[in-house]
Amino acid sequence: MPMETTAGRPRDARIDAAVLAATRAVLAESGYAAVTFTEVAARAGTSVPAIRRRWPSKMHLVHRVVFPLDVAIPPRDPSATVDDELRGVIGGCALLFADDAMRRALVGVFSELADDDELQHEITARMQEVVIADLGERLSLAAVRDGVAIDADPALLIEVAFGSTLMAVMIRGVASLDAAWRADMLDVLRGIVGAR
């Protein structure tokens, strides 16, 4: 099994996967408050120190579970249009909020981040530096393929898409994220991109 090495310490990807799966299960079953390193370690068949070496706090671990990079940064399509990329943002947000673990984690995540500005900066740096930069590059490349000029702020696009998805789920439930909602969201994001 492949091993990942960080700072000179061999890192077993099997432990990472087991811990993330165990955390997701606890979140989906019982919510954020029920997540403890002890409970996760028992379910994952590992130790609390092994978890702490990877994620220094519960917040770091939960954030990694509910905001997976494989959803936030899907594989690239070299023929994608601007609309395709916008649909990808919408689909990614819908996928996140369709997840029981994500919805149950949100209250705890928001509460902890509200109380600690330093933690919020650290936790969200991954999204700021990786996800938003990736989306900006995707949109620029798609605009060239489409032969259009865009005036897109990728951070604003993500904020609007994520916030709108959150409110739709809170007010009308996951079933509201249907084809009609996605079409409406595409129109909204097109307005932000301002392709011309």
Image (cartoon, grey):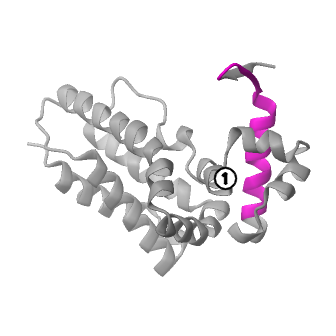
Residue in the picture at 86% in, 58% down? 39
> In x, y percent, where is residue 98?
58, 61
- Residue in front for this viewpoint, 80 or 50: 50
Residue at figure coordinates x 50%, y 72% from the top left: 169
Q: Is residue 23 magenta?
A: yes
Which quadrant of the figure has residue 8? top right
Decide whether residue 74 is among the magenta residues: no
Residue under numbered circle 1: 57
Residue 129: image x %, image y %?
39, 38
Query: What secondary structure is found at the residue carrying circle 1?
Result: loop
Highlighted range, magenta: 7-27
Classify the position of the N terminus by image quarter.
top right
Counting from the top left corner in percent of width and height, residue 191 is at 17, 56
Q: Residue at x 23, y 32 (%)?
A: 140
Q: Judge left or right: residue 67 versus residue 182.
A: right
User: Which image quadrant for residue 144?
Assistant: top left
